[in-house]
């Protein structure tokens, strides 16, 4: 009656065995490491560079555990956290700030476990530390560059209408000069006809004879700054999603700052590289020889061998209009990026190329780069600079629309990175790091210790209560609890989940729910015995009659957990994830594992009296 077949025992044992295997990596301690990437995606880390890095560290008395190169990213495993911090400072100064160096923890999981895909749990920022960025949007530069571009567009429009002007853009002001007051009056009329936005007027207009001064209104300035920050916020979130970072935090702080926290990152150097880089595109027509120097600007090619070229100051469109970008190879096997534009961008491109077939269209890559140094006290010293370079200056052979391609890239790595940045969303305004912090293991270790202590205390109290109250049945329930914890750990490790402090709370709650299921079963068996049902039937009835109650309770809790995950933020999601997994595993262990042990103990012998 209460006997499982061999295949049923085998199935349960197999699930538990797989759970143990995938939970095993969590018992191996991680080692401090550095992850190094090069700031220029077209450069590659070669054997000479690796040798120089290793030699430099050895000369400083730092013992290198191992070096591993993967996807043009070098991981250096070290012996201690002190060596890790010292190595970061040494290599930053050694590279003159050109290396992108990230602190990380490298798992010491045995090779055979890594080969089958077993890996340790990702720990959240509150448990294992991680990377914390505080970025400031350069709203002043953004408004100045936007105003300068608008000034160039106005001059082009005035020239088309027959009244020539020159302009100068300084800060938040455009100064326009005309040959006559009649031309100035016509220009004022044009500006006033196009001086409306959703927030009211765009410019404050003042006239002084043949000179016109345009200045952004406070409302419009506030509007474009909010747009820039929100656009950067969305772009950063998309970039983090592209990187596959678990449970990140990307949120606005104050008027022009954004906080980015990356817990549980596996490729922190690449994450810093993508998030910290302002990459955008500007499409401009190549300037004519007859154009005034006020209407054109000189740019260097990204490939230094190509020299430089003059492009118009008017920006046809920017990366903000890009809806999709994919890297590929052209018919000659050279890297390219296929780009799709939105409707507005397609119209702008069509307008710019119509009537300009035979001219060149320049594509400028705009990058906000940062060099990072560390002083003797390990304080971060940063230098930021804006770099604009031509990556393509091809002849317009036909009118372009919403789809075209960019060629002239130096390699597939650069094409892939540019496509990712454009696909994830262009940054509307440049940003700089005002705070870059690596959350060390000290606070995380304290949280882990307290979390583990709470789980252990909970387990011990439950163990004692179950043994004293239910005897052999309690022993079976305790074994099922251990199996439950192993399965929760293994599932979260296998799916790449991130364990946070609220997640530990979810595990503690799972322990209580798993015990609750067993208590319901044992209470039902006790009632059956009080009704003078023979022991074997009482065991069978206890499990079968309690099943529906257990399922109802757990399903309703699971629904709540899923809702928490759907509408919650980081910490709440962490709690919901562990609770959801714990509910599923507790059903398995409370019903099947406990039942298999009870059947093994009582199912193969005659029981005349059952104490529970």
Image (cartoon, grey):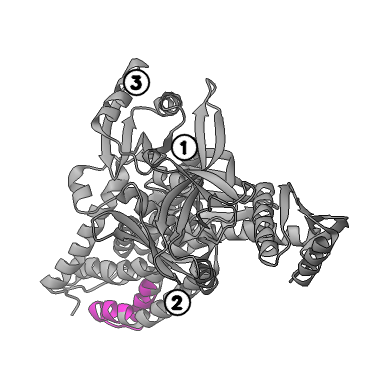
Which residue ends up furthest to the left in the rendered image?
Answer: 6
Find the magenta span and give its range: 521-543
Residue position for label 1: 441
Front residue of this view, candidates 360 and 96: 360
Callout 2 secondary element = helix
Does the image show residue 61? yes
Front residue of this view, candidates 485 and 219: 219
Residue position for label 3: 56
Front residue of this view, candidates 533 and 308: 308
State whether residue 296 is above or below residue 550: above
Our reading of the magenta stretch's main secondary structure is: helix
State whether residue 195 is above or below residue 103: below
Viewed as shown, does residue 49 lie left or right of 7?
right
Viewed as shown, does residue 148 lie left or right of 105?
right
Q: Are marks 1 and 3 in contact (CB under 8 Å)?
A: no
- N-terminal of the two: label 2 or label 1? 1
Where is residue 401 shown, x and y percent of the image?
45, 72
Callout 1 secondary element = helix
Crowd band around label 1 with a 10 angstrom C-alpha radius: few (<14), some (14–19), many (20+): some
- N-terminal of the two: label 1 or label 3? 3
Mark carried by residue 553: 2
Q: Do the residues labelled 3 and 2 touch (CB within 8 Å)?
A: no
State whether residue 552 is above or below residue 135: below
């Amino acid at each position: 009656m209460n006997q499982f077949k061999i295949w049923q025992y085998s199935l349960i044992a197999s699930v538990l065995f797989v759970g143990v295997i995938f939970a095993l990596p969590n018992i191996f301690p991680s080692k401090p490491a550095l992850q190094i990437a090069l700031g220029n995606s077209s450069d590659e880390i070669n054997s000479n560079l690796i040798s120089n890095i290793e030699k430099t560290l050895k000369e400083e008395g730092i013992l290198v555990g191992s070096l591993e190169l993967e996807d043009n990213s070098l991981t250096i495993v070290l012996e201690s956290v002190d060596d890790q911090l010292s190595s970061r400072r040494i290599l930053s100064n050694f590279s003159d700030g050109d290396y992108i160096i990230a602190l990380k923890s490298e798992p010491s999981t045995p090779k055979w476990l890594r080969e089958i895909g077993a890996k340790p749990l990702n720990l959240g920022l509150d448990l294992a530390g991680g990377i914390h960025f505080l970025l400031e949007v350069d709203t002043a530069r953004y408004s100045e560059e936007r105003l300068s571009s608008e000034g160039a567009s106005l001059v082009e429009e005035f020239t088309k209408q027959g009244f020539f002007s020159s302009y100068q853009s300084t800060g938040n002001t455009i100064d326009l000069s005309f040959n006559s007051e009649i031309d100035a009056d016509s220009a004022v009329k044009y500006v006033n006809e196009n001086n409306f936005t959703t927030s009211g007027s765009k410019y404050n207009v003042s006239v002084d004879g043949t000179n016109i001064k345009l200045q952004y209104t406070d409302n419009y300035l506030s509007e474009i700054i909010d747009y820039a920050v929100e656009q950067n916020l969305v772009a950063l979130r998309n970039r983090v999603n592209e990187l596959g970072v678990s449970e990140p935090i990307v949120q606005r702080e104050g008027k022009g700052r954004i906080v980015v926290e990356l817990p549980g990152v596996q490729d922190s150097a690449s994450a810093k590289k993508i998030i910290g880089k302002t990459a955008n595109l500007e499409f401009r027509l190549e300037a004519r020889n007859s154009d005034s120097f006020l209407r054109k600007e000189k740019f260097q090619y990204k490939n230094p061998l190509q020299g430089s070229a003059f492009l118009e100051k008017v920006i046809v469109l920017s990366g903000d209009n890009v809806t999709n970008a994919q890297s590929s190879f052209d018919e000659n096997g050279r890297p390219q990026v296929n780009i799709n534009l939105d409707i507005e961008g397609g119209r702008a491109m069509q307008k710019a190329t119509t009537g300009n077939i035979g001219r060149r269209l320049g594509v400028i890559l705009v990058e906000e780069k940062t060099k990072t140094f560390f002083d003797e006290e390990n304080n971060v010293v940063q230098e930021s600079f804006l770099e604009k370079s031509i990556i393509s200056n091809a002849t317009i052979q036909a009118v372009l629309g919403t789809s075209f391609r960019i060629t002239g890239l130096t390699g597939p790595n650069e094409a892939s990175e540019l496509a990712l940045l454009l696909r994830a969303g262009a940054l509307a305004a440049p940003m700089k790091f005002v705070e870059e912090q690596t959350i060390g293991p000290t606070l995380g270790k304290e949280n882990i210790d307290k979390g583990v202590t709470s789980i252990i205390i909970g387990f011990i109290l439950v163990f004692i209560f179950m043994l004293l109250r239910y005897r052999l049945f309690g022993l079976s329930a305790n074994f099922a609890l251990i199996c439950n914890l192993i399965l929760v750990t293994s599932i979260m490790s296998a799916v790449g989940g991130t364990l946070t402090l609220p997640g530990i709370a979810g595990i503690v709650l799972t322990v209580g729910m798993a015990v609750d299921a067993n208590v319901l079963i044992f209470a039902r068996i006790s009632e059956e015995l009080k009704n003078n049902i023979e022991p074997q039937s009482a065991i069978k009835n206890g499990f079968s009659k309690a099943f529906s109650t257990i399922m109802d309770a757990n399903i309703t809790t699971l629904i709540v957990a899923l809702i928490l995950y759907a509408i919650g933020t980081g910490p709440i999601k962490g709690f919901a994830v562990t609770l959801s997994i714990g509910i599923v595993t507790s059903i398995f262990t409370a019903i099947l594992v406990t039942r298999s042990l009870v059947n093994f103990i009582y199912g193969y012998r005659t029981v005349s009296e059952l104490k529970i």
